[in-house]
Amino acid sequence: MKLRSGTELKSTHFLQWYKTAHKVIQVLSRPKGRFTVTSAATGILERLNANEVVIGDGGFVFALEKRGYVKAGPWTPEAAVTHPEAVRQLHREFLRAGSNVMQAFTFYASDDKLENRGQTLKITGAQVNEAACDLAREVANEGDALMAGGVCQTPSYLSCKSETEVKAIFKKQLDVFIKKNVDFLIAEYFEHVEEAEWAVQVLKMSGKPVAASMCIGPQGDMHGVPPGECAVRLVKAGAQIVGVNCHFDPLTCVEAVKMMKAAVEKAGLKAHYMVQPLAYHTPDCNCQGFIDLPEFPFALEPRILTRWDMHKYAREAYNAGIRFIGGCCGFEPYHIRAVAEELAPERGFLPQASDKHGLWGAALEMHTKPWVRARARRDYWENIHPASGRPKCPSLSSPEGWGVTKGHTELLQHREATTAQEMQHVLERQKKAKSAV
């Protein structure tokens, strides 16, 4: 691995970046791992305590759905068992792009989710969790990466099952994570702080570091608990790292984490902070986030952030005091590479994937067309306003916003497939919601 040499960074177009990257140049003579410079710190807390930037990975569920390995609807991760090569390759691409956390593909890998609404998988949660951990560890060992196991919200909680029943589900996953000796644990994608607290309490039984990440924005959780209060409760439950993931765009998520940080500090508590947002613009979302958008999940592509948007996100997150910075749904490896490139001066190195990427478009100087060569400069890409190419489409949507959450009959989950009667009911509700807009 090496920093750009020759004319790429010495070009006057990139003098500004070149000056800010002096810390990168100073460390490049040190021995390096296969994909990254080796960290002097070992665990996640040691790295964060040393003020290192930890870069997470991207959105496995959406990425693998587009590649044909995950079914939209249940969004379950059985591909870790049925198509391990696809999961392994995506891990490897994120590692190469600069991620130094390989999060096992255990999203929605609880038994109650794997058998929810007509799922007929003959694969157990334990099998999925074990296979996912093995793949993540295998790739983490190829670089200087940590491996994390994760749990997320459950159908059982949404169906108003007891605290004991919900915690038992988390405990089954935790048993696998302990067996596989993960480096740390993540409780992520929780819409309700109460369930997130339960998850943290279970994960703390392992004695390993615990991060807790909620899928909320500045409006708070689905019962109106503000982000700051959510964070304080999670820290008191035992989480050493708190933040948000999914449901909202990067800058909205950064704003929510700022609120968390302010509240934790006001309460006299200590924590590290993480953010792993969507790679979609969501200025028109309400409390539920992008799930309420009419484009969810199959027509979100016009909202995708560019790699240059990711540079801004990474810098905003870093300036907010967030040191665990990654992505969720929509994040592809090139997005993570942009985060890693923006924070290269702070990290002291570029990812291997940057070997094939001219910083701020520098490699366009090699293009055959002169008007494209003229775009080989930072100020061009920093200030571009991309067109969608869809003249009949609006810039913003009207979220459906049914207001249904835990405690509502319509959200009760069951093993049986959704019935025709249930489908008729939701279609009527959809028609009523649209007429009210």
Image (cartoon, rainbow, N blue to C red):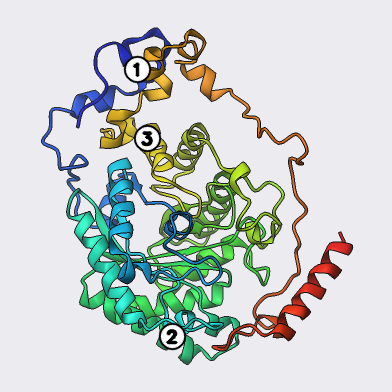
Could you say where residue 307 lies in the image, as x and y percent from the top left?
Answer: 47, 35
- Image position of 160 (left or right of 85): right
In which quadrant is the C terminus drawn? bottom right
Could you say where residue 112 lies in the image, as x and y percent from the top left?
Answer: 47, 84
In which quadrant is the N terminus drawn? top left
- In the picture, the disc for residue 193 is none
Q: Secondary structure at mark 3?
A: loop
Quick one: label 3, few (<14), some, or many (20+) residues within 10 Å? many
Q: Answer above or below: position of 252 versus 374.
A: below
Callout 2 amino acid: Lys
The first of marks 1 and 3 along the sequence is: 1
Pick the front one: 93 or 27? 93
Pick the front one: 15 or 402? 402
Residue extending furthest right?
Answer: 435
Q: What distance separates the C-alpha of mark 2 from that of mark 3?
A: 38 Å
The first of marks 2 and 3 along the sequence is: 2
Q: Secondary structure at mark 1?
A: helix
Image quadrant assignment for residue 385 = top right
Q: What distance separates the C-alpha of mark 1 from that of mark 3?
A: 14 Å
Image quadrant assignment for residue 105 = bottom left
**2 and 3 marks in contact (CB < 8 Å):** no
Q: Label 3: which residue?
A: 343
The first of marks 1 and 2 along the sequence is: 1
Q: What distance separates the C-alpha of mark 1 from that of mark 2?
A: 51 Å
Residue at (59% x, 24% y) in the render: 384
Q: Label 1: which residue?
A: 19
Q: Label 2: which residue?
A: 167
Residue at (24% x, 76% y) in the render: 178
Could you say where residue 4 lies in the image, as x and y percent from the top left?
Answer: 27, 21
